[in-house]
Amino acid sequence: MTEEILFTLKSPYRDDFKIRGFRFGCGEKSVAIVGAMRGNEVQQQFTCSQVVKNLLAIEKAGKLIPGHEILIIPSANHFSMNINKRFWAMDNTDINRMFPGYDKGETTQRIAAAIFENVRGYKYGIQLASFYMPGDFIPHVRMMDTGFQNVKLAKKFGLPFVMIRKPLPYDTAVLNYNWQVFDTQAFSIYSGDTDIINKDTAKMAWLSILRFLHNMKIIDNTMHEGYTSCVIKDANLETIISNQSGILYGLRGANDEVKKGDILAKILDPFTGEVRSEIISPLDGTIFFAHQKPLVHHNTVMFKIVRF
Amino acid sequence: MIKTIISEGLPVDEQLIIRKNTIQHGNGTKRICIVTGTHGDELEGQYVCFELIRRLNESIEHLNGTVEVYPALNPLGVDSVSRGIPTFDLDMNRIFPGDPNGHLIEYTAFKIVEDLKGADMVIDIHASNIFLREMPQARINVQTSRKLIPFAKMLNIDFIWIHDAATVLEATLAYSLNALKTPTIVVEMGIGMRITRTYGNRLVDGIFNMMRKMDMWHGAALKNISKPTVSTKGEVHFLNAEFSGIIIPSVSHSDIVKKGDLLCQIVDSYQGVILQNVFSPVDGLLFTLRTYPVVYEGSLLARIYSETTEK
Ligand SMILES: [Zn+2]
């Protein structure tokens, strides 16, 4: 493994901002992995650090298969992470809305350009991602329906679900989309949490990355097969929206199997504790996403349930 | 008359309320809408809303049609000095046309579009951000420029920037409305967190001028409307900082600059040295100028429009 500084940016008064890369093996550019791009993606950073740790052990054991290069960037935004901000410390812009980047442009365009310059041209690209809605997810792999995606490959992670999603206008500026446009098979791994470290879901995520590397014959690291992934699209998800606001009293969470008629959560009056609404499952299925914040707005996505 | 277009529950004893003021007189069927406050830190539009309504009320008998004013599309942001929607991650101007089955905010965006749809003209007023000062200008997507330029010219502004179509911009309010055949012009002027009364007055004069041309207003309106430069015959130059440091401005904003003019200096306040002298690369119109002093490598310092000289 070689550790490199891929990009440096001077700050007026803070320490220099550096993006570090950890490169394993040499040969064909096989896999690039990007961790936290937002300051609150602590789970993503932790997951990436565990991938680095495991690859170091695998390298020591001589189990990196020759002819492959793996590049890992665990953190691309600790300038925000260190001061508890989600977006870029200075101007609040989102690095993951700046791809493919522009090296003569705004600061975060330059950061995106530096990341992209380093991670493009790899056969596979893996991003540890987070979602814009607060809540718990079933760990899954996401691919964008760009016409270039290969679902069979996504199943090699052995996570419970593979989700194929139609890109929206703003998606054209995210890393995953640009990877695909530039001929990299791109996957986003959602491990379920963001601001906190959940050891169990993080482990599922880093094991799935090692499993993928093994299945693609980039490392020799036999392990259990994982799940036979279920492939879903947005149309397979039933969305349940809150019909009241108040304090959320959750009863069921991501990964739970539910039956039609089950009570999934209650919304309570914040003054009297009285039940304002019971959220009832309209179908049999598995909870894919569950709202997690203790306070809930009216008309907010509470649950997404996979319909079978 | 104040009408509520959205009222949705927040967790504890409060509604998210979006309201508009509908001012109607005569039997004319024309309707224009003035919207602002999508970005909670952009406040120049507040004065425009106030002054427009004040003047309309003063001589309502000259109005023949409907003027609808939406001062705060993002009331939680405006009232809490927050550019975005507090608790929500995405820029509000990147979620249009919204989704009736989506998150509260996506649902809100959907209802806003439904409410504005069908207007004869929508003016969406923005005020840059806290970093950059903009001269009064309209921003128009090249796809809708033929239809919108004649209206933008009525608005008493200095510059009309025709920009290329970009996929990410398809989620803006203006794009969504134009796609629904509701003509919408984005006006950018001034700077975030401040009100520039002269700019506000100019735009209000421009709106009355436009209403007169649309046969909705028969009262007084300014005669000598500013003739804006239109960006079709030239190029916009972006100047970005090459060093991180503190900028000291050297020119005033909204100026014609000459190639080689010193625009600002980036300095190092530890050592007392100049890191970069920022010169204008062209003769042109300085329509954007950074005023926020702290910069990183890459921070936008200025935008200059220069006309291509024909050979
Ligand atoms: Zn704005």
Image (spheres, rainbow, N blue to C red):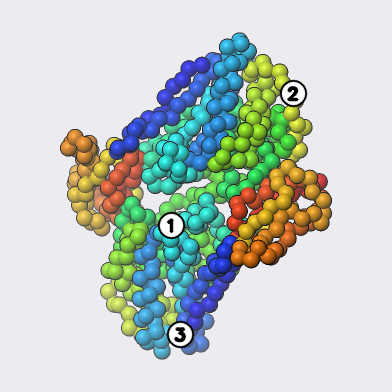
Q: Is residue A254 above or below residue A214?
A: below
Nearer the observer: mark 1 or 3; the answer is 1
SS label for mark 2 = loop
Q: Which percent across, then down, holds residue A68?
A: 58, 17
Task: Kindly identify which chain the residue marked by label 1 belongs to.
Answer: B
Residue at which label 1 appears: B82
What residue is drawn where x is 60% and y is 65%?
A271
SS label for mark 3 = loop
Query: Badge 2: how crowded within 10 Å, few (<14), some, or many (20+)?
Result: few
Residue at which label 3 appears: B64
What residue is drawn where x is 46% and y is 30%?
A117
Q: Which mark is residue A224?
A: 2
The alpha-carbon separation of the residues under discs 1 and 2 comes to: 48 Å
Q: Which percent across, then down, holds residue B23?
A: 47, 81
Task: Kindly identify which chain the residue marked by label 3 belongs to.
Answer: B
Nearer the observer: mark 2 or 3; the answer is 2
Q: Is residue B260 above or below residue A78?
A: below
**Left or right, residue A31 beside residue B148:** right
Which image quarter: residue A146? Answer: top right
Residue type highlighted by circle 3:
Asn
Residue type highlighted by circle 1:
Ser
**Left or right, residue A95 beside residue B256:** right
What residue is drawn where x is 38% and y is 64%?
B43
Q: Earlier in the sequence, mark 1 or mark 3?
A: 3
Q: Is residue A98 above or below residue A224?
A: below
Q: Which mark is residue A216?
A: none
